[in-house]
Image (cartoon, coloured by chain):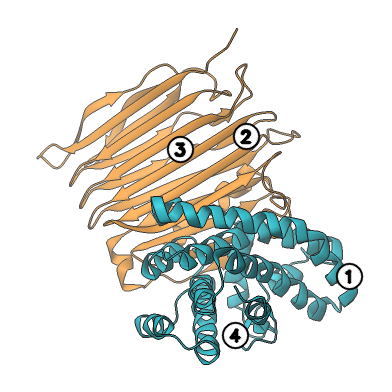
Amino acid sequence: MSRAALLMLADGRFPAGGHAHSGGAEAAVKAGRITGAADLEEFCRGRLHTAGLVAASLAAAAVLRVPVRELDAAADARTPSPALRVAARKLGRQLMRAARAAWPSQELDAVAREFPKGAHQPVVLGVVARAAGLGASDAAHCAVYESVSGAAGAVVRLLSLDPFDASGVLARLAPEVDRVADLAVEAGRGAVVEGVGALPAASAPLLEIGAEVHAGWGVRLFAS
Amino acid sequence: MTVSGVRASARIVARADGRGGTALPVLEGEGPLALRRTRGSGGEARVMLVGAMSGPLGGDEFAVRAAVESGARLRVGSAAATIALPGQSKGAARYDVRLDVADGAELHWMPEQLISAQGSDLYVTTRVVLGTGARLVLREEQVLGRADEQPGRLTSRLTVCIEGRTLLDQELSCGPGAPSGWDGPAVLGGCRAVGQLVVVRPEFGAGAVAGAVGEGVAIMPLGGPAVLVSAVAADGLRLRRALDEALACLG
């Protein structure tokens, strides 16, 4: 594997569009469920073990060559909120564009052709990781970390939270991020044998409900 | 001495009787899972699931299976809430529900709440398999702990397949021992009741259903002729009200 490629893919400055999404944090802040660093930490913990685990498992399975079409359908079934399904496909399409420029490959071209409106972002992340010479564990780590770093960054802007406090939250979550990534790789391997039905389906009702509330706002800082 | 839990199963088969009504050629329950046919209306057969013992307790394994054959209509309710309780045997209890709704058949699966009592440990799976043109209303409500009580450990997975495609696959884990963050602002935010309605109607295929939204409740069109209503509330009563209102919105 190339460690530099992993850093690139995980870098918030990689032009994949992630900065425009708050991972549900904007809706949670507005509803008063996040008011400071302590709430942010619990919010991120909930994301880690639900959306984070599911995304990382999809990404790991994609690296391990579970068919993209099946993974994309599995992602749909695990994302009941239409707003979140749209966001995931938009992010998938943007990541695909950036990745095809960075790591041109026939496989990326084929997936882009098959999903002109974008496949779910974690599935694309897995395909991209493989194109960049990375493994399942790398893709899982990227997905899990992204599931919390985006929300932490958004809360810094939404609440004017001290960025040092937000970084402290992420650092405290690091051991859990590693554990969830390991679980995701195991789940991805399980899907190779048992099919996508064996992938985790951990859900977070408030993230789904909040995404629908958020999608109905006239004015918002983040796309989701 | 090892104490082993209770194993019990119940089975319902609903079949169109050829005269516009629905017959129940199979209606079998045992132990804690007793079934009673009640008065139906129109072409619909009605069945009540009557809890004849307490439980599920730790180590118990319950399985309920209902098959609604082509053109038949079945409505299933329960006489009272189900309470998951700690048992004498170690290990989790299991409650598996498998519902098959054939082409053009209709099922209303409307049990009362599942209450997760302190110290209990239950894994519930509900798997619904629907054919072409099948109709479904399924309600699932979980109340975390009885009044002023800590909840037990509860994991519930709900899978809905239509014409061989999985439209919905969701698992919720809560209570002591669940992955951390379950009670936090991303998952339940301190709410003690959580529920879902799955409504499948062939006419939803056109995508005519709006994603209406209320406080703690969202109506979410899935990628097929189905809608998921997801709701969280402070208690079981408020949850039921939210789900009833959402169902009324769907007409």
Classify mark 4: residues with Cα within 10 Å, few (<14), some (14-19) or many (20+).
many
Q: Chain of mark 4?
A: A
CA gap, disc 1 and disc 3: 46 Å
The reply to whether the C-beta atoms of the residues labelled 1 and 4 are less than 8 Å apart is no
The reply to whether the C-beta atoms of the residues labelled 2 and 1 are less than 8 Å apart is no
Please name the residue that numbered disc 3 is placed on.
Answer: B111
Q: Earlier in the sequence, mark 3 or mark 2?
A: 3
Q: Residue at x 61, y 57 (%)?
A: A50
Q: Secondary structure at mark 1?
A: helix
Q: Secondary structure at mark 2?
A: strand
Specify the quadrant of the image occupied by residue B216: bottom right
What's the amino acid at mark 4?
Ala
Q: Chain of mark 3?
A: B
State the orange chain. B
CA gap, disc 3 and disc 2: 15 Å
Q: Chain of mark 2?
A: B
What's the amino acid at mark 3?
Pro
Task: Residue A16: give its label.
Answer: 4
Specify the quadrant of the image occupied by residue A134: bottom right
What's the amino acid at mark 1?
Asp
Q: Chain of mark 1?
A: A
Please name the residue that numbered disc 1 is placed on.
Answer: A165
